[in-house]
Amino acid sequence: MSAPKDLYYSNNHEWVKFTDDGRAVIGITDFAQQSLGDILFVNLCAEGDVCVSGEAIGDVESVKSVSDIICPIDGVVDKINNELLATPDQINADPYNSWLVVMSSVTDKSGLISAEEYEIFISSQ
């Protein structure tokens, strides 16, 4: 399972990439998509929603279960990936290019960990 070094991670298996303009792109990790199995549906919050770290911003339904997507940071949803709503299996094919939401006004990112810390975390799972 890969964990690209240029991303940050949460203990709930989301990844975060910060852009040059201060926004945050969020998706689920390779570990998460492998654990879920074939992803059938994705439900996401709405653009403009204020999200708080630790709260659900959507869910993914797979052949195994329905799992909440837990927001790893505080911020405002600028954009959702509507393409994933129609083709959720993209997450299985390429989890690190299948982003879920883009957030701005990020105020709390204290719960994020590095790729190295995430790899240690998933090795204990």
Image (cartoon, grey):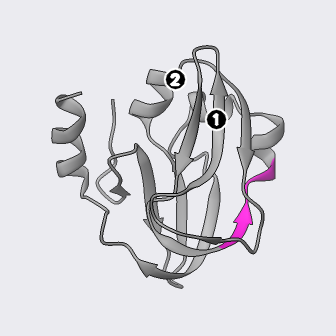
Q: Position of residue 105 (x, y in %)?
A: 56, 85
Which residues are the magenta region? 77-82
Q: Residues within 10 Å of mark 1 (few under 14, many from 20)?
A: many
Per the image, the residue denoted by label 2 is 36
Task: For marks 2 and 1, give the CA distance.
Answer: 9 Å
Looking at the rendered structure, the secondary structure element under dot 2 is helix
Residue sitting at x 60%, y 72%:
103
Q: Residues within 10 Å of mark 2 (few under 14, many from 20)?
A: some
Amino acid tagged 2 = Leu
Per the image, the residue denoted by label 1 is 60
Residue sitting at x 58%, y 28%:
92
Residue that protrudes farthest toward the front in the picture: 55
Residue sitting at x 52%, y 23%:
36
Looking at the rendered structure, the secondary structure element under dot 1 is strand
Amino acid tagged 1 = Val
* Quarter of the C terminus within the rendering: top left
Mark 2 and mark 1 lie on one chain; the one further toward the N terminus is: 2
Callouts 2 and 1 close, C-beta under 8 Å = yes
Instruction: Give the quarter of the image for residue 98.
Output: top right
Q: Position of residue 35 (x, y in %)?
A: 44, 22
| Secondary structure character of the magenta stretch overall | strand
Q: Decide if residue 60 is on the left or right side of residue 52.
A: right
Residue in the foreground of this view, choosing between 24 and 64 = 64
Magenta stretch encompasses residue 27:
no
Residue that protrudes farthest toward the top in the picture: 63
Residue that protrudes farthest toward the right in the picture: 86
Residue in the foreground of this view, choosing between 33 and 107 = 107
* Quarter of the N terminus within the rendering: top left
